[in-house]
Image (tube, coloured by chain):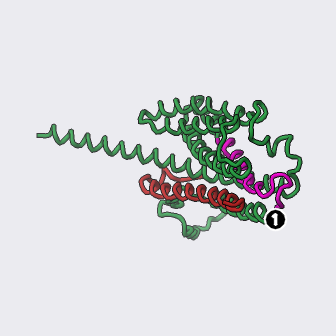
Amino acid sequence: MSTTGYIAAAWVGTFAAVGAYAVWILRRGRRASELVPEEERRWM
Amino acid sequence: MTIDPTPVAPVAPPVDVSPSGRRPAPTSTSSRATRILGALSLAGIVALAVFGLAITPPDAQLGETIRILYMHVPTVSAAYVAFIVTAVGSVLYLWKRSEFWDLLAASSAEVGVLFFALTIFNGMLWGKITWGVFWRWEPRLTTTTVLFLTYLGYLAVRRIPTSVRTRATVSAVIGILAVVNIPITHKAVDWWRGLHQEKTIFGTVDPEMQGTQLFTAYLGLTVFLLLFAWLVIHRFRLAWLTERAEERSLDDAIAARRAEGVEEVAP
């Protein structure tokens, strides 16, 4: 693989991993919100 | 003095106010603050991509590979911050015995492990170009592995089925002990001779990094710290909701069991 390929892998891999983790948290957060009464999920 | 008996016309409630008079609770872990933080992070990522991949020139010594360091250095810095937050949260948990500090420590450790894994990933790609191999058991990489495994162990301990208090106490002790690895890993390049290059920023080496290169490095640091804050807030809220949901589930199970007991006793 060329240097450009490694650079692309670094950038794409980094933001893809962070993005996937963010989506995982947000989706789980939505599901968990449905199980908890309103008073327990009032954020600042 | 006469008082006008006419009542004041009631003010129409805002659209987003529930019949109980309070704003409806959010149906996710998002809030106004996290949306602003998220928008700033996204704008920062776009700016970082423009500077890191297009505007910044190749380095005189590192060439194009410096573009990998624009990912490698900010991710490791954010991971160190995350692990320090875990240690501070752990100390405050042992002092205050508050669920808040326990969940903050755990949330920060998880995000830190993600960033640290990305640091290793980017470092391996950089190593393949520069050294010709993805991995060498040299001092910095060895201490990095120990640090990574320590925090994986921290997360594994948090999954052991035990009481909430025991889990929080044991993981707090590990969270405090584990942070000692950070200075050892960071100073490994100074204390032992190895392949890894010396400190890129916040160090005395690499005087070539200046101008747009240095700006891009600090921009990357800012972006990843924003991302860290955004992820930790969401992860903390998810952990909080999960704890509340588990409590409710347990309460419901106990109530159901008691109801069964009453039915059995009844003639």
Closer to us: B101 or B204 = B204
Closer to us: B65 or A27 = B65
Spot the red chain and give its letter. Answer: A
Q: Quadrant of residue B161?
A: top left
Q: Main secondary structure of the magenta part?
A: helix
Q: Type of residue at label 1?
A: Ile
Horizontal side of A11 relative to B24 (left or right) equals right
User: What is the display colour for chain B?
Assistant: green
The residue positioned 64% from the left and 56% from the top of the image is: A14
The residue positioned 80% from the left and 56% from the top of the image is: B63
Does B64 appear in magenta?
yes
Residue B130 in sight: yes
Q: Which residues are magenta?
A: B56-82
Count all numbered tags in the image, as a single digit.
1
Residue B10 in sight: no
Quadrant location of the N terminus of chain B?
A: bottom right
Horizontal and vertical percent for residue B151? 58, 38
Closer to us: B188 or B64 = B64
Location of mark 1 (residue): B55
- Chain at numbered mark 1: B
Considering every residue shown, the one lying at the far front of the view is B132
Q: Determine whether the residue tagged by mark 1 lies in a helix, strand or loop.
A: helix
Horizontal and vertical percent for residue B115? 63, 48
Closer to us: B207 or A41 = B207
Horizontal side of B116 relative to B55 (left or right) equals left
As displayed, is residue B232 above or below residue B24? above
Horizontal and vertical percent for residue B237? 54, 50
Quadrant location of the C terminus of chain B?
A: top left
The residue positioned 85% from the left and 46% from the top of the image is: B206
Does B57 appear in magenta?
yes
Q: Quadrant of residue A10?
A: bottom right
The residue positioned 78% from the left and 42% from the top of the image is: B197
